[in-house]
Amino acid sequence: MLIGIDASKNGTGICIRGKSKTILYTYTKHLPKKIKEFYLDNNDFTVIAKQQIYPDTLSDFEQLRHIRETIFKDISPFIIGDAKFFFEGYSMGGNGRITMLAELTSLLKDSVYEMGYQINGIFAPTSVKKVVGGKGNMKKDEIYDTCWNDLQLKELMNKIEEDGHKFKNDCWQIDVLDAWAVSEMGRIQEQS
């Protein structure tokens, strides 16, 4: 089992690649407000996108703890037996609050260790983009188009779009796509 994690306060993506099925999960602010959860299950994939909901009164760190607790409560049932965890590293040139990202990533890594596992790889964002799309400075929509060229992922994307979730920047599909790309890096590392 290979698990790719792309941490983000606004939408952490998790890809759990098992022998017979891949789970794509995100706890995100990128779902339309009226949708609390999106769930899709087909032969090859299960997709779970949950709307981030927590009280506004929480401090920044309490919000991060809530995100971590929700994610691991939701994904733990899918993690069975031998599992290898891979994270996307920090993008130092990226927009956003690097401190919040570092704190969330540390909490997520700590949860991995609490479950009895270790971190098997941390990949620079440019490396992930290069392996998945051919160049390290790809934009999100370019990565999206390239990754969905995989036949199974393309079929899944079509089903997601049929359910009314079309791709656009800052959509929840980016969260799971980034996690899938991290898991792809892990797969490549494990095969070499």
Image (cartoon, rainbow, N blue to C red):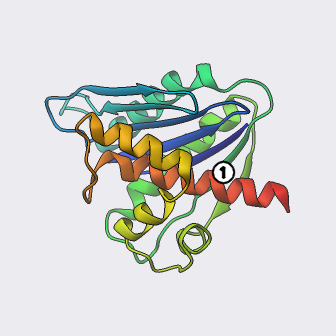
Foreground: 76 or 161?
Answer: 161
Which quadrant of the rendered structure holds the N terminus?
Answer: top right
Q: Which image quarter: residue 97?
A: bottom left
Residue most extreme to the top? 77
Could you tell me which residue is drawn at 56 percent across and 63 percent down? Answer: 89
Judge from the rendering whether residue 169 lies leftward or rightward of residue 68; answer left or right: left
| Residue 53 x %, y % | 25, 29
Residue 34: which quarter of the image? top left
Whole-percent x, y for residue 168 in the image: 25, 57
Amino acid carrying mark 1 in the image: Phe
The crowd level at tag 1 (other Cα within 10 Å; few <14, some 14-19, many 20+) is many
Residue nearer the viewer, 84 or 166:
166
Residue pointed to by mark 1: 86
Say which residue appears at 41% left-offset and 63% top-offset.
145
Question: Which quadrant of the figure has residue 16?
Answer: top right
Spot occupied by residue 167 in the image (x, y as percentages of width and height): 28, 53
Q: Residue at x 36, y 46 (%)?
A: 11
User: Is 155 displayed left or right of 110 in the figure?
Assistant: left
- Count of numbered tags: 1
Residue 91 seen: yes
Q: Position of residue 23 (x, y in %)?
A: 55, 33
- Secondary structure under tag 1 reads strand
Q: Is 119 rendered above or below residue 188? A: above
Asked whether, in this view, residue 75 is left or right of residue 173, the answer is right
Q: Outermost residue toward the right?
A: 192
Judge left or right: residue 66 versus residue 14.
Answer: left
Judging depth in this view, the residue of 163 and 85 nearest the camera is 163
Quadrant into which the C terminus falls: bottom right
